[in-house]
Image (cartoon, rainbow, N blue to C red):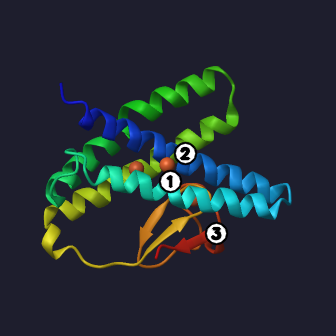
């Protein structure tokens, strides 16, 4: 029985989660003015990211770019059509206002991700090289120039950063 493919998926998921969790822990350490711990969590997060990406490079689920775009579109569609609507309903029922907004904003941004991947899939070889800007509050992504106001969450222009 071949276990390695499943192990790669499990390790990829675990390392990815550790990466994000340590970034959140780093942020908390910074908020608590523990700069040494901030730097430690930040550095270990960078290390976990390498583990995640290295494991992912051996996953059979990473295919050629056209296939990857299709898979990414399907995943984004699942999120905005099925996953987030149900999570938003649960948050509403449980009166969890913060998570409801977090899920709602993410749902709107997943639609945009889907649209961007769809556009890219029309002609992957000729897809232009754009600069992308991200809203730090909600993750809204836009090519070219940041807007005056985030269309998803209303954040102002200076809350956008350019992706390297
Ligand atoms: Fe690791
Ligand atoms: Fe997405
Ligand atoms: Fe936003």
In the rendered structure, the answer to whether residue 18 lies left or right of residue 29 reads left
Q: Residue at x 42, y 31 (%)?
A: 83
In the rendered structure, the answer to whether residue 162 lies left or right of residue 30 reads left
For disc 1, the marked residue is 48
Q: Are marks 1 and 2 in contact (CB under 8 Å)?
A: yes
Instruction: Tell me residue 62's x, y (percent).
Output: 22, 51
Q: Residues within 10 Å of mark 3 (few under 14, many from 20)?
A: some
For disc 3, the marked residue is 159
Q: Are marks 3 and 2 in contact (CB under 8 Å)?
A: no
Establish whether ligand 3 lies closer than 8 Å to the Cβ of label 3.
Answer: yes
Say if 129 sits above or below 13 in the image.
Answer: below
Q: Is residue 129 visible?
A: yes
Residue 59 image label: none
Choose the circle earlier in sequence order: 3 or 2: 2
Q: Is residue 154 visible?
A: no
In the rendered structure, the answer to whether residue 8 lies left or right of residue 50 reads left
Q: Dot 1 lies on which element?
A: helix
Instruction: Name the front one of labels 3 and 2.
Output: 2
Q: CA distance from mark 1 to mark 2?
A: 7 Å
For disc 2, the marked residue is 18
Q: Dot 2 lies on which element?
A: helix
Q: Residue at x 26, y 36 (%)?
A: 4
Choose the circle earlier in sequence order: 3 or 1: 1
Q: Residue furthest front?
A: 1
- 43 and 151: which one is in front? 43
């Amino acid at each position: 029985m071949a276990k390695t493919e499943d192990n790669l998926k499990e390790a990829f998921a675990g390392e990815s989660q550790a990466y994000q969790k340590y970034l959140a822990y780093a942020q908390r350490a910074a908020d608590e003015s523990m700069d040494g711990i901030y730097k430690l969590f930040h550095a270990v997060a960078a290390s976990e990211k390498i583990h995640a990406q290295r494991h992912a490079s051996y996953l059979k689920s990473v295919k050629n770019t056209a296939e990857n775009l299709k898979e990414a579109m399907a995943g984004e569609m699942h999120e905005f059509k099925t996953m987030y609507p149900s999570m938003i309903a649960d948050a509403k029922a449980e009166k969890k206002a913060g998570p409801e907004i977090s899920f709602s904003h993410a749902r709107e941004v997943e639609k945009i991700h889907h649209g961007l991947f769809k556009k890219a899939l029309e002609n992957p070889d000729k897809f232009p090289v754009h600069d992308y800007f991200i809203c730090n509050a909600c993750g809204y992504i836009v090519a070219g120039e940041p807007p005056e106001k985030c269309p998803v969450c209303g954040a102002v222009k200076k809350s956008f950063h350019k992706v390297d």
